Amino acid sequence: MLPASDITEILTNLAALNLQPNTTAQILAAVLAPLLRSAEPDPPVRPRQHAAGPRAKPRQATRQKRKYQRGAPDARDRATRALKANPGISWTKLAVTAGVSRSTVRNAARELDAEARKATRREARQARKTSETAKPATERRQRAQQFLRGELARGPKPVTDVEAAAEKAHIDISTLAQARGDLGVVTSRGNAGGVQAVQWSLPAG
């Protein structure tokens, strides 16, 4: 509200103008009313009230994952059994017999062919491995036989000397023993420097 001194000053100034009463009233209404309203204190601002609890988020519809079902495994099994039981029948007849589609029979046939090729490769690798393992053994045995023929060509020789020479020639004892049996090497005792020692010699004739 305006102070009383301001209102008194306004009224004195209006009276000095010698205006008509109606005019004075209109001026007062036009001037004082807005001033009086602007002088009124603003209403207190109330703080914004928040909801008691957190606002719940709208529930979103859960998206269900689509489940993709593969072809029934029993159809492939039936086709495989039919192929094994009837190797000479066409795929179309096999499909009718097994109660499956022709494509299922074709896929089963391809799997059987792939398994057969794998089995063939495995057998071939095993055969090569066996051959490679047997070949060096045979070669070592033949080499030991040649070694014994050379060592005993001039007559009986102490076993210790033969074995020492075999070790230098990188011939193991077991291979040497096999070669000795193959050649029919004769074992005997003889004097070597006054001491009887076991000696080997080639068979006569």
Image (cartoon, grey):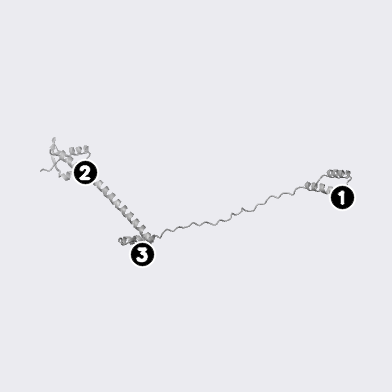
Image quadrant in which the C terminus is located: top left
Residue at image x 83%, y 43%? 6
- Left or right of 48 in this view: 116: left
Q: Can you identify the residue that label 1 sits on? A: 22
- Left or right of 139 in this view: 31: right
Residue ranking furthest to the top = 193
Residue at image x 39%, y 59%? 73
Q: Can you identify the residue that label 3 sits on? A: 96
Which tag, 1 or 3, sits closer to the chain's start?
Answer: 1
Crowd tier of the residue under label 2, counting other residues whose Cα lies within 10 Å: few below 14, some 14–19, many 20 or above: few
**Res. 157 mark:** none
Percent coordinates x, y for residue 76 in the rendering: 37, 60
- Left or right of 43 in this view: 89: left
Label 2, label 3: how far apart the Cα atoms are: 59 Å
Nearer to the camera, 89 or 130: 89
Nearer to the camera, 26 or 81: 26
Which tag, 2 or 1, sits closer to the chain's start?
Answer: 1
Label 1, label 3: how far apart the Cα atoms are: 116 Å
The secondary structure type at the circle numbered 2 is helix
Crowd tier of the residue under label 1, counting other residues whose Cα lies within 10 Å: few below 14, some 14–19, many 20 or above: few
- Left or right of 54 in this view: 199: left
Crowd tier of the residue under label 3, counting other residues whose Cα lies within 10 Å: few below 14, some 14–19, many 20 or above: few
Percent coordinates x, y for residue 44 in the rendering: 73, 49
Nearer to the camera, 201 or 64: 64
Q: Give the residue type at disc 1.
A: Asn
Percent coordinates x, y for residue 57 in the rendering: 59, 54
Q: Give the residue type at disc 3.
A: Val
CB atoms of marks 2 and 1 within 8 Å: no
The secondary structure type at the circle numbered 3 is helix
Q: Can you identify the residue that label 2 sits on? A: 139
User: Which callout, 2 or 3, points to the residue nearer the camera?
Assistant: 3
User: Which callout, 2 or 1, points to the residue nearer the camera?
Assistant: 1
